[in-house]
Image (tube, helix red, strand yellow):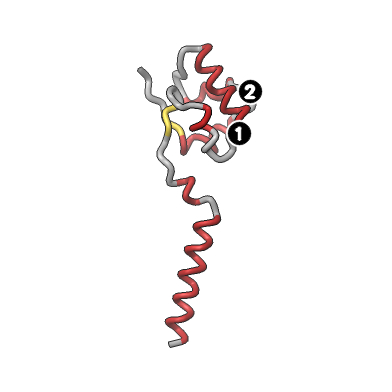
Amino acid sequence: MKSVLKKTVCVLLLVLLVAVSGLPAIAMEKMDINKATVEQLVDIKGVGEVLAQRIVVYRQQHEQFKSLEELTLVKGIGSRKLEKLRPFLMLVEN
């Protein structure tokens, strides 16, 4: 009986840990960097309002991104930041 209670407590703790750890953000669908709005971009961990606006402005000024690596030309995005963003982004050229 104690073993069942311990397992139940462990499962509940694991569920709680997943719920508060931000792991659901990992499961979000990838968004097309050439169509994403500021509002959508700020849903990505590590992208605030200012960076999202810079991404959209850059895209508008250059028609569209030709590669995800081009994001490093946006102020505030270096190679490390790009690697953190990459799992949440995709590129669909029109």
Q: Secondary structure at mark 1?
A: loop
* Image quarter of residue 20: bottom right
Q: Is residue 2 above or below residue 24?
A: below
* Image quarter of residue 28: top left
Q: Secondary structure at mark 2?
A: loop
Q: Residue at x 35, y 17 (%)?
A: 94
Around disc 2, counting alpha carbons within 10 Å, would you say few (fewer than 14), some (14 to 19), or many (20 or more)?
few
Which of the two residues, 90 or 35, is positioned nearer the viewer here? 35
Q: Residue at x 47, y 86 (%)?
A: 2
Q: Which residue is identified by label 2?
A: 75
| Label of residue 48 in the image | 1
Where does residue 56 sit, x and y in percent of width and height?
A: 53, 21
Residue type highlighted by circle 2: Lys
Residue type highlighted by circle 1: Gly
Q: Residue at x 41, y 26 (%)?
A: 91
Where does residue 64 sit, x and y in percent of width and height?
A: 45, 16
Q: Is residue 34 above or below residue 48?
A: above
Which of the two residues, 78 or 45, is positioned nearer the viewer here? 45
Query: With 51 as the anchor, is 86 left or right in this view?
Result: left
The quadrant the N terminus occupies is: bottom left
Q: Residue at x 47, y 50 (%)?
A: 24
Q: Is residue 65 above or below residue 5?
A: above
